[in-house]
Image (tube, grey):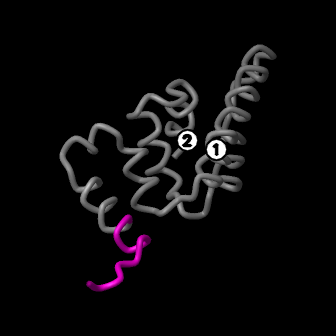
Amino acid sequence: MKNVNLCDTLSFQLKLLSSMKEIDRYPFTKLVIERNLTEREYDETMNLLQTLSDIYEAEREEGLLDYSSLLFHYAGMVCWKLPITQSLAALHSEGYYKELTELLLSYT
């Protein structure tokens, strides 16, 4: 029997999963799979979003009206594997940080 590489098998299985119609309801998860993000890169992205959400809340309480700097922060710090606008739209569609992602998308 031929020795099968576990990484190749998992990669194939993930491709099958990502091609399923059901995955379209989870566009950010699909993007994470398609772009081969590691768990660390995923966690860093989610931590970045939490940080930006906290900054947004603080700046909003201070009466700030222009939040474009948050988009620059996101664009500069998000994992290089994630397209900026596509990842924000996917996050928003999947329900992550809806208010923040909607705001950031308005600047794109």
Q: Amino acid at mark 1?
A: Leu
Mark 2 packing: few (<14 Cα in 10 Å), some, or many (20+)? some
Determine whether, in the image, residue 95 is placed left or right of residue 51: left
* N-term-proximal mark, 2 vs 1: 1
Give the quadrant of the N terminus: bottom left
Question: Which percent across, then down, holds residue 12?
Answer: 30, 68
Disc 2 marks a residue whose amino acid type is Tyr
Percent position (x, y) of residue 94? 40, 33
When asked about the image quadrant of residue 29, the answer is top left
Residue lying at 64% horizontally and 44% vertically, measured from the top left: 71
Q: Residue placed farthest to the bottom in the image?
A: 2
Instruction: Indicate the quadrant where residue 97 lies.
Output: top right
Q: Is residue 2 above or below residue 92?
A: below
Front in this rendered view, residue 2 or 11:
2
Residue 46 colored in magenta in the image: no
Callout 1 secondary element: helix
State the residue lying farthest toward the left: 21
What residue does disc 1 label? 71
- Which residue is at a point 56% across and 37% down the rendered structure image? 104
Residue 30's place in the image compared with 89, above or below, is below
Residue 49 placement (x, y as % from top left) = 64, 37
Residue ID for mark 2: 107
Q: Are marks 2 and 1 in contact (CB under 8 Å)?
A: yes
Q: Is residue 64 left or right of residue 8?
A: right
Instruction: Give the Cα separation between the discs numbered 2 and 1.
Output: 7 Å
Q: Residue at x 43, y 44 (%)?
A: 28
Residue 101 drawn above or below residue 45:
above
Give the extent of the magenta segment: 1-10
Residue mark closest to the camera, 2 vs 1: 1
Give the residue at the far front of this rendering: 1
